[in-house]
């Protein structure tokens, strides 16, 4: 059974792979046998991940730069093809947006949330698809969010964008079947460096108490889900949103946004 989780000699592109979920995912895919092309803004972070991949006996190509534009995604695809000659797996991890009160959310920031969380995934998926097909098929995994499922104050931009990413996942699964499987992982509250920088003891306790499994998620929890969906173990799964959120039914983050007067 464990052999079903091997992806030996596959080539994966992982965006926003310098830290957090992206870095953990790149390491997990490498440990399972894949070479990886990793992109993010900060080259130093990517180099650290690449060094870890090398220790696992696989190769990592570092592509620093902005991924918000299609040109940045083209660089990832071009590097994968020039170095490894193919693409088998794409992990669309780029994204994010801070919560904020609805009336304080500008049109620009609303549009930016869609551009960063949805358009990036559209661009890389579209650019990579012809090459995944040439490789005989493969998998695309989008990193969504539990915020795309529940409604809460402060998430008009981010939550709506992640909901759109989930539906993009379903639509692409229909478009790209049967050769390319498209799924998403929807994390809950994950203890990334970004989240940890916002937490004090009181807020951490509230978030843990608000999670049925009574802990914050680990980046490895999400990486394991991505590996499942990328590997033969998930070969009969497409168009699905895998919720890895500790059982959340609503936000565990109190944004403390008051009623409107």
Image (cartoon, helix red, strand yellow):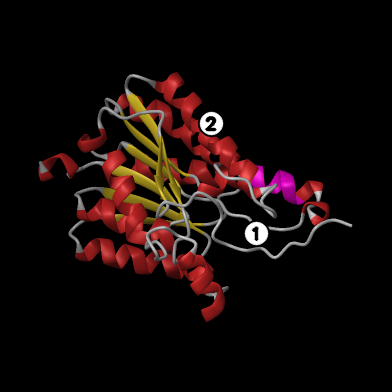
**The magenta stretch spans residue 111:** yes
In-front residue for pair 5/78: 5
Residue at the (50%, 41%) spot, across then down: 74
Q: Name the residue carrying label 1.
A: 98
**The magenta stretch spans residue 98:** no
Classified by dominant secondary structure, the portion drawn in magenta counts as helix
As drawn, which residue projects farthest toward the right?
Answer: 261
In-front residue for pair 132/161: 161
> Which numbered tag is attached to residue 167?
2
**First in sequence: mark 1 vs mark 2:** 1
Magenta residues span: 109-115
Disc 1, SS:
loop
Residue 147 sits above or below residue 212 on the image:
above
Image coordinates for residue 237, horizontal then vertical, percent: 31, 30
Whether residue 22 sits left or right of residue 237 in the image: it is right
Q: Can residue 83 be seen in this view?
A: no
Mark 1, residues whose alpha carbon is within 10 Å: few (<14), some, or many (≥20)? few
Disc 2, SS:
helix
Image coordinates for residue 146, horizontal then vertical, percent: 51, 48
In-front residue for pair 173/102: 102
The quarter holding residue 27 reads bottom left
């Amino acid at each position: 059974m464990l052999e079903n989780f091997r992806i030996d000699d596959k080539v994966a592109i992982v965006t926003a792979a310098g830290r957090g979920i992206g870095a953990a995912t790149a390491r997990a895919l490498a440990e399972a046998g894949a070479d990886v092309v990793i992109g993010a803004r900060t080259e130093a972070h990517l180099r650290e991940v690449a060094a870890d991949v090398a220790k696992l006996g696989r190769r990592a190509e570092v592509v620093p730069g902005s991924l918000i534009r299609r040109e940045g995604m083209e660089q990832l695809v071009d590097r994968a093809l020039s170095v490894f000659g193919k693409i088998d797996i794409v992990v669309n991890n780029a994204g994010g947006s801070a919560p904020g009160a609805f009336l304080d959310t500008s049109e620009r920031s609303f549009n930016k949330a869609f551009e960063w969380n949805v358009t990036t995934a559209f661009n890389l998926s579209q650019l990579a698809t012809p090459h995944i097909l040439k490789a005989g098929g493969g998998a695309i995994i989008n990193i969504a969010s539990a915020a795309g499922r529940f409604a809460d104050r402060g998430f008009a931009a981010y939550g709506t964008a992640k909901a759109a990413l989930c539906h993009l996942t379903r639509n692409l699964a229909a478009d790209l079947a049967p050769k390319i499987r498209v799924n998403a992982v929807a994390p809950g509250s994950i203890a990334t460096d970004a989240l940890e920088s916002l937490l004090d003891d009181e807020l951490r306790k509230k978030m843990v108490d608000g999670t049925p499994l009574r802990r914050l998620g680990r980046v490895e929890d999400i990486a394991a889900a991505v590996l499942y969906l990328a590997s033969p173990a998930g070969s009969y799964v497409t168009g699905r949103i895998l919720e890895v959120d500790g059982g959340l039914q609503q936000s565990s983050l109190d944004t403390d946004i008051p009623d409107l007067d």
